[in-house]
Amino acid sequence: MTTTALARRAATGSLLGLALGDALGFPTEFNDVPSILAKCGPWREMALPRPAIVTDDTQMTLALGRGLRTAMDRGLLAPKRMERPVREEFVDWYQSPDNNRAPGRTCLVACNLLKDEGRPWQQASQIDSKGCGANMRVAPLGLVPGLSDEQRAGAAQLQAALTHGHPTALAASDLTARAVRLLVQGAEPARLVGLLRSYAHENRSRYHERWLGDLWTRAQDPTPEHFIARGWDECLDVLDRLQEAVGTVSPEDDPCLATGAGWIAEEALATGLLCFLLFPDEPVTALRRAACTSGDSDSIACLTGAFAGAHLGAEVWPREWADRIEYGGELQALGALWDA
């Protein structure tokens, strides 16, 4: 963590932004833009709901964060040391009475299978799913300090693979964590898409066997390199669309029309980034734009908030909003841990 990131409390800002975006987008998910405008009024004036309730996106982010904290209290982050506590946290989330926020089917199916402690996690992973549940929750891996690039990438892909085994889910999660990390470290938003494209090209044929084991054998690919390259290629395609959109899309148009509705992992990354990059210095406006979209509005806004908070820090969010967001105390505690 850089001194600048410490001063602006980037981890706390990212976690708060993620939850605020989630809460802002919760009432608008599954609605088209005209319906949202009819319900909420002009999108630039959207108010945080009362109460400010979040979805499974924030709940699973916290589950991952708690699992990482437990794993790293025990030593250096490594596959087996991470898998058990994160798996336990995901199962606890699955069984919680608070898991009533329209969670995704893949997470429910996989977490039900993860309850069987004798089952290798690869057998629970839904190998054909690349839903945005894979990366809506991955921000903590961009925020935890002290990890090597290999640890951060492998852990980001492992947490995705516990539920979503499609190679695009793995690559999009890796890229999402990478984007958060770059912003924490002070990367200029204007350079972000280029940095992510370079990262994708560099890692296109790298299969993290230490973290993923034999996951690739559950698909129909001839080699692990072929398996993971499929995911990176889909991410590169959407990054190309994003790069074009950043310079051409009007802020008044639905961002989903340019980079996708966000139900799948690579589109959630791209559309969340697009909303952030349209308003890199206006984080609340970025959240409102993300929440007023025709796609998976809570997940898009969740990721937009994670990017904006990582870039600008904790103080950019309205105090009145931050004070009443659900799970605010736990979000702030995790953020303070990683900011320190």
Image: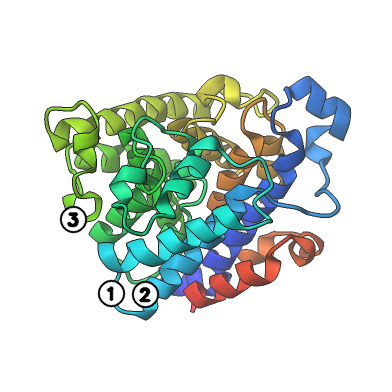
Residue 81 x %, y %: 30, 69
Q: Is residue 107 visible?
A: yes
Q: Residue at x 53, y 56 (%)?
A: 61
* Earlier-in-chain disc, 3 versus 2: 2
Q: Is residue 77 above or below residue 165?
A: below
CA gap, disc 2 and disc 1:
6 Å
CA gap, disc 1 and disc 3:
14 Å
Label 2 neighbourhood size at 10 Å, few (<14), some (14-19), many (20+)? Answer: some
- Amino acid bearing label 1: Leu
CA gap, disc 3 and disc 2:
18 Å
Q: Does residue 241 appear left or right of residue 261 in this picture?
A: left
Residue 210 bears which disc, if any? 3
- Amino acid bearing label 2: Met
* Earlier-in-chain disc, 1 versus 3: 1
Q: Is residue 176 above or below residue 132?
A: below
Residue 226 x %, y %: 17, 30
Residue 3 bears which disc, if any? none
Q: Secondary structure at mark 2?
A: helix
Q: Secondary structure at mark 3?
A: helix
Q: Secondary structure at mark 1?
A: loop
Residue 72 bears which disc, if any? 2
- Residue located beneath label 1 in the image: 76
Label 3 neighbourhood size at 10 Å, few (<14), some (14-19), many (20+)? Answer: few
- Amino acid bearing label 3: Arg
